[in-house]
Image (spheres, grey):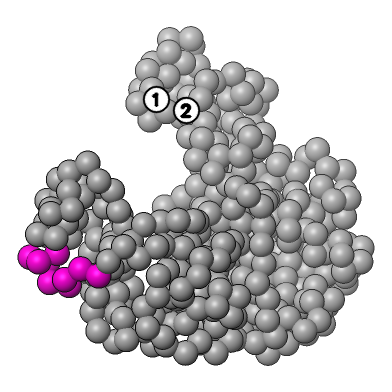
Amino acid sequence: MDSAELSFLFTAEGLRLLDSLPGYTAGGAVKQVAELRRAGHSPELVAAVLTQARLREKATAKFGAFADRLLYTQAGLEQATRLKVAALHAGRFRAAGVTRVADLGCGIGADALAIAALDLPVVAVERDEVTAAIASYNLASFPNAEVVHADAEEFDLDAAGVDAVYLDPARRTSGTKNTARLTRPDDYSPSVDFAFALAARRPTGVKLGPGFDRSLIPGDAEAQWVSDDGQAVEMGLWFGALARPGIRRSALVLSASGAAELTAAADSADAPVRELGEFVYEPDAAVIRARLIGALAGQLDAGMLSPGIAYLTGDTLVASPFASAFRVRERLPASENQLKKALRERRIGTLEIKKRGIDVDPATLRTRLALKGPEAATLILTRVAGAHEALLVDRVSG
């Protein structure tokens, strides 16, 4: 969305029309365009409202039923924090007892919204004019939220009376759509160096990608990796009063059943390698990113399946929010031709393929296996004690 599209949307006609539209579907978009044009709406207005309708539909994954109450840019939605994660961020600021938060580089305002919803005053700073306007709309119902169109690195925190800072540095090139991912932390906006310098002076939270270079994590930060339904979605670095005493590594696992957290004072050493047991565990993505596999192994009474491979194995089934469990059915031949024959003999037609430590594309392999039959199973392709193995297993949890 650009400023011209925004000018059509930010009218009484545009907002009423957007809210009157039925749920967006790609298949129905052409028909909607024709109907709206026949009703007398301009091409520009139709394009603007249908763009928003499409983004609202896409935003449901992050914002649930709240998605239809917000406006978006394509780039802003891609980087926006999921609403339930933003609520946890906001809770840190409230627990720390801060009085006014600056959200520097606020994007469409998701985190600022969550902070304001906890009755904490927040000033949201965004340098892109269109994105700042979108954030202003999204935060308009909160009198304790202010949006400022400015460069985050030049904003005067002292003059604004701010005693804590949150930053979600842009990891894509500037603009509201058709942006490209930035790979160098020095190119983020605001820059990582700027964020870390702020953290030396006041309580600060910094949202980064889950694959952020661990060697750049400051020693005084609490690093928390977050997964949502098994997908690693972010790493948060928390400084000062926002960091919890004695915790430097954390894996926060969110799912339909709630939230669970595994914490430690540092990376945990991997558990010893042991023989294949009755069960194989796949740690959650946040646990793997946080390097807390060893800590998890202790909870599961399990060992590593192979050095450096993120699978655990044990003889007792232990339910855990931090790992999916699989009961080992049998070990199959690792060669593709023998594997294909073995699966056909077992009449397996539906196969979930998981792999670690082996260079294979599961989708391509599934096609070559030409599966047939009424049975279903999971196949784990990995290394066991360093050797390639094919484990036929059944999922029992996770």
**Which numbered marker is on residue 205?**
none
The amino acid type, in three-letter code, at marker 2 is: Tyr
Q: Residues within 10 Å of mark 2 (few under 14, many from 20)?
A: some
Task: Provide residue 327's location: percent of width, then percent of height.
Answer: 40, 63
From the image, tell me which residue sits under label 1: 29
Is residue 398 in view from this perspective? Answer: yes
Tags 2 and 1 touching, CB below 8 Å: yes
The amino acid type, in three-letter code, at marker 1 is: Ala
Task: Provide residue 358's location: percent of width, then percent of height.
Answer: 26, 75
Task: Provide residue 361's location: percent of width, then percent of height.
Answer: 23, 64
Q: In this rendering, would 115 be left or right of 282?
A: right
Q: Quadrant of residue 165?
A: bottom right
Q: Residue at x 50, y 56 (%)?
A: 398
| Front residue of this view, candidates 255 and 10 | 255
| Front residue of this view, candidates 190 and 296 | 296
Please tell me whether residue 332 belongs to the stretch shown in magenta. yes
Q: Residue at x 48, y 20 (%)?
A: 42
Please tell me whether residue 1 belongs to the stretch shown in magenta. no
For the record, the magenta segment spans: 331-339
